[in-house]
Image: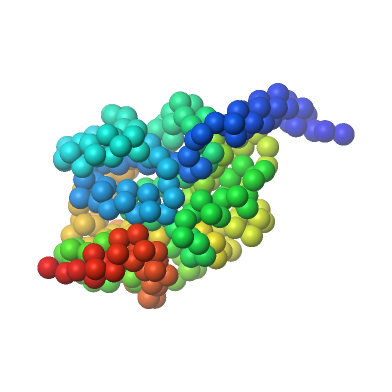
Amino acid sequence: MPSLKTLLRAPMVWRARALDRAVAARDVPTLAVVAIFREEAPFLDEWLRFHEGVGVGHFYLYNNFSTDDFREVLEPWIARGLVTLTDWPVEVGQLPAYRHCIRQHRLDAKWMAFIDIDEYLFSPAADNVTDMLGRFDGVPAIGVFSPYFGSAGVEERPPVPIARAFTRRSKLSKISAKTIANPRWVYAIRNVHLYKYWRGETVDTTGRPFQGDRPVLDLLRLNHYWSRSLSDLQTKIQRGDASTPVPRDSDRHFAAEREMNAEEDTSILPVLDRVFGTTECAKAG
C-alpha cells in the first residue's frame, strides 16, 4: 500500500511527468548551466567557451554584487542568445538564485547543471557532456563528483587556460559533488550540492543511489579549480561567499589549499585541447 507521503506527492509527480512531456515536444537545450558569480570577469569568457564546447546549450548567470567589467565580457554571449543574465543583489544569494531559475526556466532545458565559475564540467568518455545524459532518462538528477585542484604553489596565474595551468589536485578521499537535475522534479534545495525531488533520488554515473564517499569519475566529472593561483585565492577570500554570510578565513583557506596539490591529474587536457586547440592551450607569455 502506498505511503502517505507517496499519496500526498502524487499530484506533483503527475504534474512533473506532464511537464516532462511538454519539454520533450519543444526545441530546448539538452543541458543548461546555472551559476551565480561575483567579481569573476577575468574567468567568464574562458569558462563559457569551454562549456559551450562540451555541449552546454544555455547559461543562466546571476550577478551577485560584481563591480568589475563582467557586462562587457558577457555582452557577446547575450547577443548570441546563449546567456541569460540576471542581476541578483541578494545577500547569501546562491540558493535563492537556484530556486528562482527553476521557477522561471524549468521548461527551458531538459537538464540543468548547478555549478560555479571555478568548476569545469566534462566527460572523460565522450566529446560532449550531453552524449552521456541520455543514459539517465527517468531519474531526477545525477550527482557529479568534483575533485579539488590547487595552485601547485603558483603565485600568479599564467596566461593559459585554467585547466592547463593547474593540474594538481587533492586526494580523492577529499572530494565534493554537484548536481545535474531535471528541474521539473526538484521540490527543495537545501544546500548547493544535492537536492530533493518529488520522486526518486540522485544517482551516480553507474545509476546507483548517490553516495558522497564513493567517488565515480568514469562518465562525468567536475574539476573544481578551488584556488587557481595563490594571488587568486587571496582575492577569493576577500570577496566573500554567495552561499554563506560567514567571512572567509585566510589561514584556514591557505591551509586547505596546501592539501589540494597531492596528485597530478591531466584527465581534462584532451577535452581542453579539442575545445580550445593545442596552440592556445600551450601558449605562454
Up the image or down, 154 lies above or below 128; here it is: below
Q: Quadrant of the C terminus?
A: bottom left
Q: Is residue 223 left or right of residue 6?
A: left
Closest to the observer: 205 or 150? 205
35, above or below 9, in the image: below
**What residue lies at 21% left-to-right and 45% top-to-bottom?**
41
Residue 115 pos. (x, y %) = 41, 47
Residue 69 visible? The answer is yes
Q: How many marks on residues?
A: 0
Residue 84, placed above or below residue 147: above
Q: Residue at x 54, y 61 (%)?
A: 219
Q: Is residue 35 above or below residue 142?
A: above
Residue sitting farthest toward the right: 1
Q: Is residue 190 visible?
A: no
Tell me the quarter of the picture where residue 72 sits: top left
**Residue plotted at (44% across, 35% down):** 98
**In the rendered image, which quarter contains the N terminus?**
top right
Instruction: Describe residue 39's horizontal placement relative to residue 14 as left or right.
Output: left
Residue situated in front as seen by the camera: 85 or 175: 85
- Residue shown at 44% from the left, 58% from the top: 122
Furthest residue to the left?
285
Question: Residue 121, how many percent across, how many down?
Answer: 43, 55
**Camera-side residue of 31 and 25:** 25
Percent coordinates x, y for residue 156 in the rendering: 16, 64
Q: Answer left or right for 231 relative to 272.
A: left
Measuring from the top left, give residue 207's x and y in whole percent: 66, 55
Colour pattern: rainbow
